[in-house]
Amino acid sequence: MTRVQDAPTGPEPTPPRRPAQDDIPVPPRRPVHATPGNQLDTAHPQQEGPTDLRLVPPALAAWATAALALDASTTWVTGVALAALAVGLMLLLTTRRQSTRRQPTRPQSTRPQSTPRQITRRRPTRRQLTWRHATWPRVSIAALLLSIAAAAASAGLHGADLRRGPVPELAREYATVTAEVEVGSDPRLTRPRISGDHAAPVSVLVDAEVRRVEEMDGTVVETRAPVLLIVDPGSTTKGGDAKGDSRGRPEHSPWLGLLPSTRVKVTARLAPSLTSGDRVAAVLRVRSQPVPEVVGEPSGAQRFAGRLRAGLREATDGLPGDARALLPGLVVGDTARITPELDEAFKETDLAHTLAVSGSNLTILLALLIGPPGLAQHIERRGLAPRLGISLRATALLGGVLTLGFVVVCRPDPSVLRAAACGAVALLALATGRRRSLIPALATAVLLLVLYDPWLARSYGFLLSVLATGALLTLAPRWSETLRRHRVPPRLAEALATAAAAQALCAPVVAVLSARVSLVAVPCNLLAEIAVAPATVLGFAALAAAPVAMPVAKVLAWGASWPTGWIADVARTGAALPGGGVDWPGSWTGALLLTVAVAALVLVGRRLVKYPWLCGICGFVLLLIVVAPAPLTRVITGWPPPGWRFAMCDVGQGDATVLAAGKGTGVVVDAGPDPKPVDQCLRALGITRIPLVVLTHFHADHVAGLPGVLRGRSVGAIETTSFEEPADQVEFVRRAAAERHIPITRAVAGEARRAGPLTWQVLWPPAPSQHLAPDPDGPNDASIALLVRTAGLRLLLLGDLEPPAQQELLRSPAAALLGNVDVLKVAHHGSAYQDPDLIRRVAPRLALISCGEHNVYGHPAPSTVAALRAMGAVVLRTDQDGPLAVGGSGEGLRVIRG
């Protein structure tokens, strides 16, 4: 008997399904990022795929539209916005309808629901690919038009803020009003500026918004108009007490303590803005209000940020000068202590981005939290978050909180928001290793920021930030890989490629701003980058510790002072190099020429890198150009001539002369209006030791360049006139001397001195009891006049003596010494105010005039030049002939133009 086997009670097994023609099983997916062989590897380009540029055209279109629409008429802006919106929506609707009609429906699967779903990837059919290619241009154009519409609307609204309300009309009438304004930025001081023979007054500048204004008839109007608030020097110190720095800057003004979002009431005069197309509806000038009248306290967030910033300033009070000034600027963008000389050094070396809040600050902080970017593909990133066992979600939350705190402390103004956005994009690119895929993120950031604040479209800072970030995402990886293939160490290749790429893209814009191209920008940025991260981390640690533990904050600030001082030294050293930069046309035509030059240099460099010996030769030649050693420069240019005795530096509208007193030694008479030209002149002359600096009088065009004379040189003493006016320049000289422990003496007629082969005698001014009464020309008439003898030559230096003092000099006992003069330094830049009897008495063989090109004073006067030539003198002037050097002896007098 055959036994029948029981059938299984479970569900009947489903026979294997034959795969459809378009269903292709997907093999196990390879990781998007291959495991790197070293810490600096990035994702393989083939794994990243082609760069997605779809959002770039809308971002650029929105940028251009916002820049044009800010000061356009309302009718034009409205028309553009509506037309772009209508056409864009029409394209989208048309594309949507066609997609509904033409896109094939996916066939229903006959597979039972209980069957486990096999992971498949459906290959697009030919019809689907054709449809995608047909609709993609329409979608792109629609996105472009919608971006234009949004940018036009946003820019139109922001631009209208400058034109609406009573403020623009009152500004055109130069009306004096009582207004309530809200502070929008940290108050700042204007930079010292030399105007003729005096320093321009230093004022306090505040970006603000007028919220309420009282018109002439007493009507109070609520408004919202952005203005530039200028507090004149008479209002910057309480009670008119001029407490300032070496240039008379009112550092202790109560106005400087105002925090953003504070509301103050002012009585001021409105005036139109001097620059068109700026984010200012008018200029509000306060003239007689020593203390701001606060009517509204700042917000809690700003008070908290203000306490942190004040704590950082207090923690840095005991640091050396450069570190004390630079650390707050590096950490939170507080540049109040940055001196004009240090600021100029950072600009000349293209390190100015370290003085402002930039995306690199946030990148460093987030990298400290997440881990080094080079370990992005490793399981252990070695950041603070993994070490503390913080989950990924909590790490992301902490990163967001840190970014928010960064924006609050550094002030939520557009520049900080720009830095935060670009810094986050740069960090994301580094941390993921997918730099090319971050181009859409950068385009999105640009688009959103321009829509949020259309004024960024006209900001050079915004343009430089985007260019630098774009260089990091596009050029730097390729250049780094090329350098590695040629055996450059990975870390050096990464740093060099980043610095070079950023410089290549940013140099044309920097040239527009400064009319100069720096040849030391890349090496200076490389050297400074070493210290930026430790200075930033320690600086932020001091910032956080200051409110709770000031001693700890001071220790952290002291630690940060070392890398900060290194950055300042790099900037000063690079700026001091004779060939550190070349002049360039400061226009967009010049920028285009520089772009072509950079492109050509890159193409040549790609071929040059294959020949290391040729690269070495080019690097050596560039080093010689930048350093410009004096012996080589003398051979090529003939300047300074061998055996020179007297040199007149070309310092613009001012005076600075040098008397040779031995090898590398010179007596300097006056310092000119700017430290940089006189410093360069002394370097070219090879002067390293100065036994005496003679300041003929205290006008700014003779003393303001004193820091350039003292920089890096051994100075024995400073001699000045006893007529101490103007007071601000007297204080400036005293502080500059005190900082370097240089004694100050006063010159008196009859005094005789010697330095090496050089002898000189003071002819003027007479003893203090015989001084002229103070008058508008008092400082000029109190100038020190010197008669110098060297190598058989007689030189007469008259300072800025005016005719009354010149006539008194002819009547003084020194008149017997005035004959047979070989070289005359013409008084007061060759002005028309000269005593003809003195010119006839002196009868010089050579007359030298120091003056600035196209100066507003008309120096030298044609009548003075004609009178000197009528006496048989050869007349040379620095505005036409450049620096001048006198050599020879006796009858062999010669002069060389620099």
Image (cartoon, rainbow, N blue to C red):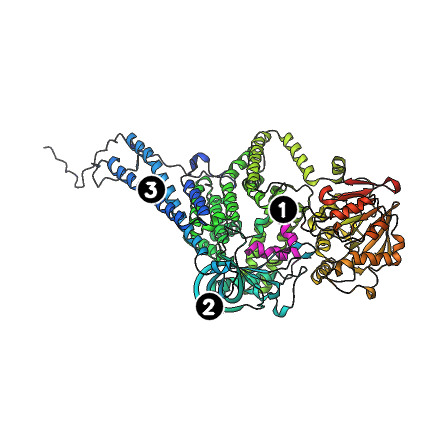
Q: Which mark is residue 217?
A: 2
Q: Quadrant of the C terminus?
A: top right
Q: Residue 22: horizontal and vertical position, in percent?
A: 28, 31
Q: Residue 793: horizontal and vertical position, in percent?
A: 87, 46
Separation of disc 1 and disc 2 at Cα? 52 Å
Does 143 sit left or right of 733 as displayed? left
**Identity, as a three-letter code, of the amino acid under mark 1:** Glu
Does 44 sit left or right of 543 as displayed? left
Q: Which residue is mark 1?
A: 348
In terms of sequence position, does the residue under pointer 3 or pointer 1 come before the other? 3
Name the residue nearer the viewer: 300 or 256.
Answer: 256
Q: Give the answer, above or below, for where 795 lies relative to 731.
A: above
Q: Which residue is mark 3?
A: 87
> What residue sits 55% from the left and 58% below the top?
541
Q: Which mark is residue 565?
A: none
In terms of sequence position, does the residue under pointer 3 or pointer 2 come before the other? 3
**Boundaries of the magenta span:** 319-346
Q: Is residue 865 visible?
A: yes
Separation of disc 3 and disc 2 at Cα? 49 Å
In terms of sequence position, does the residue under pointer 1 or pointer 2 come before the other? 2
Name the residue nearer the viewer: 160 or 633.
Answer: 160
Mark 1–mark 2 CB contact (< 8 Å): no
> What residue sits 87% from the left and 45% below the top?
791
Mark 3–mark 1 CB contact (< 8 Å): no
Say which element carries label 1: helix
